Amino acid sequence: MSEAKRQGTSVIILTFLFALLLSVIPLPSWLVFVRPEWVPLVLIYWCLALPTRVNVGVGWSVGLVVDVLEGNLLGQHALAYAVIAFVTVKLHKQIRVYPLWQQALSILVLIALCQLLLAWVRGIIGQAPDSWAYWVSSFISAILWPWVFLLLRDIRRKFRVS
């Protein structure tokens, strides 16, 4: 394995760790529903940028980490993240050619799919979301997508991740 690959892998891991950190920072109860879905945003970016390196396996692994970190039912985030990684990798050539505002619409659909899968699993175990505010974070994530994309793209270029 070349030095560039090792450096690239560590950069990818660090971006996921930072997203995990952002997703567990305590917020006031009235702000919980507006927290962006940081981990899926980072996962989608890397699946778009490097679909051969970051794919369903990485989505599954990161999802398991989120489940353990948040103390959720083991596998619920893993399932949701693996599905959105699969869809992103399958459609990466189409999504990449869109302008950022159209990519944001794609991100809205992908994050909503992730949240739908999570709500489905939670509904099965009797913990279904009780309000429409659950879906607000999909819109917040889509709104933030252009900035997340530009930041991660600059990081990828600066550290020559390939």
Image (cartoon, helix red, strand yellow):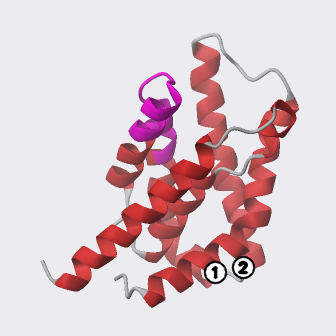
Q: Residue at x 75, y 74 (%)?
A: 102
Q: Position of residue 93 (x, y in %)?
A: 50, 77
Camera-side residue of 7 and 109: 7
Residue at the far left in the pictured view: 1
Pick whichever of labels 1 and 2 is earlier in the sequence. Answer: 2
Q: Position of residue 99 (x, y in %)?
A: 71, 83
The amino acid sitting under disc 2 is: Leu
Asked if residue 103 shows in the view, the reply is no
Q: CA distance from mark 1 to mark 2?
A: 9 Å
Whether residue 119 is in magenta: the answer is: no
Camera-side residue of 54 and 14: 14
Instruction: Specify the quadrant that holds the N terminus.
Output: bottom left
**Magenta residues: mostly which secondary structure?**
helix
The amino acid sitting under disc 1 is: Leu
Q: Residue at x 45, y 37 (%)?
A: 79
Camera-side residue of 68 and 113: 68
Asked if residue 78 shows in the view, the reply is yes
User: How many other residues sit within 10 Å of disc 1, few (<14), some (14-19) or many (≥20)?
Assistant: few
Q: In the figure, is residue 62 to the left or right of 25?
A: left
SS for dot 2: helix
Residue beneath disc 2: 100
Residue at the far top in the pictured view: 126
Which region of the structure is painted magenta?
A: 64-81
Q: Position of residue 129 (x, y in %)?
A: 75, 23
Residue beneath disc 1: 150
